[in-house]
Image (cartoon, rainbow, N blue to C red):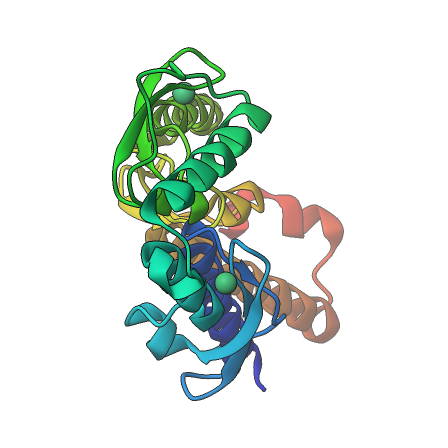
Amino acid sequence: MNKLNAEKALIKYQEMKSIIESEGYKLLSKQWEGFRGYYDVECPRNHSYRVQWPNFKRGARCIKCHHENMANDNPNFKGKSRDVHCSEMDIKFKTELTNEGYTFDDDVEKYKNNITKLNVICPNNHDWEVSWNSWSSGKRCKKCFEDRVRKDTEEIRRELDLEGCQLVGEYRGALKTFNYICSCGFPSKTRIKDFRNGTRCSRCRGDRNREKLRDSRIRKLQEWEEQNLGVSEKEKNSPSRE
Ligand SMILES: [Zn+2]
Ligand SMILES: [Zn+2]
Ligand SMILES: [Zn+2]
């Protein structure tokens, strides 16, 4: 693979990984295998399976979870009465909430089915409501998430300021691109890793390349002059030569 394709493959891979992870899934495969390739993923309940990327994007999710959900949704499936099923799920849901520091009014909040929302308070004291389906697919307090985005955004804004650049909009994590106004005044977008490596807007890149080309032309000309004309150091440095 040439360098450009390797770079594109890395970008595709990171984009795929961030979308899969935003669903609470894990991407186990280590590289981009194309749109027809199969990828190993692990669902939030730790089942692993293989899926093509376009199918995952279209909504293909873990089949084992699907069967488990079916069984949970239909207590008859397991030969249990609805009441027994609900009280089991109530305990299961509340145990998981408690384990992660979420609190709730045990007497008021009751599990009814996997889409009824329970009112809970997150470990950072935000009110939130969540159903078993959202919780078990990896969703957590929305306010905490927004706070993190805001805090990261402020930090990145300061970092860009120091470079004379200006962040536009929000910073949404290392894998996502963000918009900014380059120190040269040109709008651009990039990821934080590239920014930290010193990559700037296309205009700056063009300027730098032109500068490099000009420098090397001047150097070659000087070398040629030294060899062929025997120009002395003194003459070479005098401004009248320009
Ligand atoms: Zn699963
Ligand atoms: Zn919160
Ligand atoms: Zn620039």
Say above or below: 51 vs 149: below
Q: Nearer the viewer, residue 178 or 70?
A: 70
Front-most of 158 and 230? 158
Residue that lies at the very extreme toward the top in this rendered image: 125
- Residue 229 x/y as whole percent: 68, 71
The image quarter containing residue 150 is top left
Residue at position x 35%, y 41% in the image = 83
For image coordinates 38% across by 31% down, the residue present is 165
Q: Horizontal placement of 109 versus 241: left or right?
A: left
Task: Work out whether residue 146 or residue 3 is closer to the camera in this orientation and state it.
Answer: 146
98 relative to 218, above or below:
above
Residue 138 in sight in this render: no
**How far across and down, in percent of the image, does residue 53 sit?**
41, 76
Task: Name the residue rendered at 38%, 49% in the picture.
Answer: 177
In-front residue for pair 140/165: 140
**Would residue 57 be seen by someone viewing this image from the given angle?**
yes
Image quadrant in which the N terminus is located: bottom right
Question: How many numbered discs?
Answer: 0
Q: Is residue 71 left or right of residue 6?
A: left
Up-down relation of residue 9 to residue 160 (above or below):
below
